[in-house]
Image: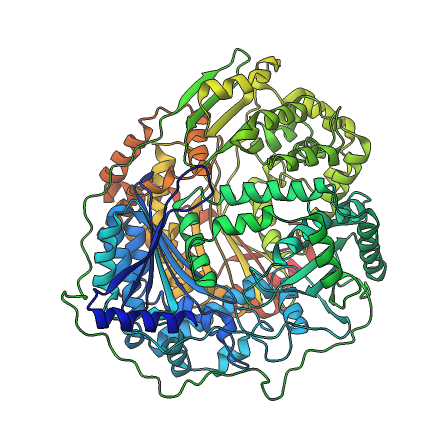
Amino acid sequence: MTRTKFFIAFLLMAATLGWSQTKLIEKVSKTGDEVVIPYEKYVLDNGLTLVIHEDHSDPLVHVDVTYHVGSAREELKKSGFAHFFEHMMFQGSENVADEEHFKLISNAGGTLNGTTNRDRTNYFETAPSNQLDVMLWLEADRMGFFLDAVTQQKFEIQRSTVKNEKGQNYDNRPYGQRSELLAAALYPYGHPYSWLTIGKLEDLDRVDVDDLKKFFLRWYGPNNATLTVGGDVDPQEVIKKVEKYFGVIPAGPEVEPMKLDPVVLNESRYISYTDKNIRFPALFLSFPTIGRFHPDEAPLDCLADILGTGQNSFLFKKFVLNQKAVQAASSHPCSELAGEFSVYVLPYPGGSLADIEKEIYQVFEEFEASGVTDDDVEKFKVTMESNFINGLASVSGKVSQLASYETFQGSPNGIGNDLERYQNITKEDVLRVYNKYIKGKPSVVLSVLPEDGTAAARPDNFSPQTEGENPFPTTDYSGLTYNRPEGDSFDRSIKPTPGASPLVQVPEFWTENLDNGMKIIGTQTTEIPVVAMRMRINGGHRLDMYTPDKSGLAVITAGMLNESTENYSTEALQEELRKIGSTISVSASDAQTTIVVNSLKKNVDRTLEILEEMLYRPKFAAEDFDRIKKQQLESLKSNEKDPALIASNVYRRLLYGEDHIYSVPSAGIPTSVENISVEDAKNFYSKYYAPEVSELVVVGDISKDEVMKSLDFLKEWKPKGLTLPEMAPVSDQDKTKIYLVDKKQAPQSEIRIGYVTDMPYDATGTYFKSYLMNYALGGGFNSRINLNLREDKGWTYGAWSYFNSDDDPGPFTATAGVKADATAGAVSEFMKEMTDYRKDGITDEELTFMRNSIGQRDARNYETPGQKANFLGRIVHYDLDKSFVDDQTKIINGISKEEINKLAQEKLQLENMNIVVVGDKDSNIDALNELGYEIVELNEKGEVIESTNEKIKE
């Protein structure tokens, strides 16, 4: 019996017996140490499934509505509908104005979004618990009262927005088109997985509003949806509210489960394309497998892990360790109806993709010869256990899992069974699925080629079918009519009034200052048995200023701490971590080196033993250094092909000027990285890794006494008398100019606009107040800049502005990726919005919105270990008192319109902005010239192209 037929039978029985409209189906509680998410499951008369998770650990509520419809319910020549609806359903409904979803939830200090994949669409909000009525009212209105609000104008704007999303995330991004080509080659013509969720632009161009309305009527009824509410709630109150807001919405047409035959390839299909945005060629192999929750999914995931995850994996050792490739990995993503086992290699330039393909098959042979060990399987099991537990860190994480299990398995009680199937994998299972799906089996082989003449692995032998009759079942959309829900006992046009805001408690924390100068701060939280640590060693790229011709040294040194030590090889070190499901990673950025540690509580001591080994006894082996340096060099050269990275790096160079260390990215530039030796890295480590410039944050299920015993080794770290250098001041340029980097035939242009401010970070001073000032201009979805460029013009997927300072003054930046033919218009609108805001100031409505939105965010700031770590990290680094949160609240509530406007006049320095545009020069130069700014043409490295600039002046 299908899920829908069961509901109908159940509801008929309920009606016969005179039951009330909502019935409890099941209730699951936590009784011990088992991995489970407690919940209650109900069904309304209209078929809506309601799942409630009660969790009073934070004053938050997360609401998720998952519709069992994704791109798999679309048809040939009508792709992209489900994703399009994700956009359209934020455009208002009968009782909710256009863009009011974002405005109302943001105004309440919450966050919201929607996502679409092949098999489902979900809409979700997280907000303080007093906002539950508002969240349910919003979701019910777009479920039951949406279609009358759909207009042709909204349709056209969102069609343009989706096109910009396609341009930004696929067409203008390195390797961005690979997924579309792989899908078309792997799946048969007409199969709903043969196109991407975002759809084909030509399909969106041919449809109209009526097509989309029919799609909505067919798939978005309450009987095809799961409403999941989790957090600081009373289940009985939730039921009453859900009945109130959703109860009158009539059920939609019956929805039958979709079942399609497995994909079978008769021979390997070779396809290729040239990507002008890449330096590294790439080879992708994709084998058809099975759908999600199939018995073979877990062992196939384990196989992917053994072949291509970690530094002891077959692919890493074959390609990356041997310096043949910058990346090599395997994965096994599964959807409801099918899955793909994928292998990819990004070889260094100059290699042969034909040879790479042969070597991939050699990897398979080596795997067969060595077999699967119990140790391999056990490491994977521990990793999966850690992943499942860490997924419970937030109420949104728990709710999304409940919703997913209910949607695809018919019961929210899936996490225990899901974990169990991974824990029950045997090495025989892994070998069985390898033989069944991979060994000797055809695949789709995609070669992605740079513009350097690299040849494909083999000549193309397959072209996806583009015309013909649809061989797959179609949906009958005839006879669908919209019946406006009737029978409300309240006025739905009136927005619910939230109750009093919940009292948000700043986490209690402890501190410890070691004799060697190291500062430690921590908080204990017992929600899940994990411990997270974050060590900040101040300095980072900033210290490269002592040897600017070796910029990138801080990043390379940090990378070397992830490699071999005196007692462990690189592979052995990573394997030790995998055995206990822990991770330790070291990286460097502009102002710091960061060590991030994550561990299950039961394995903290062993994890910290490994941290001690990495921190105190790095080996700086020559072979590790050569590989790390080569990867960094090649990545930097690759960045010179990526339009977004070109824009950011050129912008950075213009902001700081060539003599400032921050004019160079933290990873350096090719000429500086070439100068770095392994001895340089050793010296950087010896000089600048010191306890007196280090801070450690500890968050998790561990007390101060417990953790300090395990951290005893840090007391042995000897201070070095290190002080950090002062940064050179940054000079403003004399006037606002446009700096143009030509990216031939780019479908989008990347824009960066800004200057370096005079404000370092502060928690309660001018910097914080300037953050408040910018919120209405470009700091949120409903800001002037985003509403103009995205929602009104349809030129971009998103446009923002922000201040970004640390210990030293940082930049104010406005940024967007826009469609190519709107480049000059977007620059003009950016400048217009900033000019108008500086001239006319903030409105009363914007000031109130800012106060509500930012002032009520605290409920979301301390929920997860990561959020707590960020909060505590600010306290220890900037030496803040716990009361700084109260001080910020006073500033938010008390800052006047006049003070905001004065900050806008002072901090929006429109006369000396750097405007960077990376896009097609030929199609944009005339319109850019009309803006009246001096135009300077640069190459992708930020160097002036003299001859071209003479022509521009003429």
Image height check: is 681 above or below 787? above
Residue 760 appears in view: no
Task: Provide residue 267's location: percent of width, then percent of height.
Answer: 78, 73
Q: Of 832 and 139, which appears nearest the observer?
A: 139
Task: Provide residue 381's location: percent of width, then percent of height.
Answer: 61, 43
Outermost residue toward the top? 515
* Quadrant in which the C terminus appears: bottom right
* Quadrant in which the N terminus appears: bottom left
Image height check: is 934 above or below 671? below
Task: Provide residue 290's location: percent of width, then percent of height.
Answer: 62, 64
Q: Quadrant of residue 949?
A: bottom right
Image height check: is 303 above or below 624? below
Residue 185 appears in view: yes
Q: Quadrant of residue 605?
A: top right
Q: In the displayed structure, does residue 780 sit left or right of residue 640?
A: left
Q: Residue at x 35, y 88 (%)?
A: 479
Q: Of 143 and 797, which appears nearest the observer?
A: 143
Q: Residue at x 48, y 73 (%)?
A: 257
Q: Of 669 and 339, which appears nearest the observer?
A: 339
Q: Residue at x 70, y 58 (%)?
A: 433
Q: Of 45 and 686, which appears nearest the observer?
A: 45
Image height check: is 890 above or below 466? above
Q: How many marks?
A: 0
Task: Provide residue 301's location: percent of width, then percent of height.
Answer: 64, 53
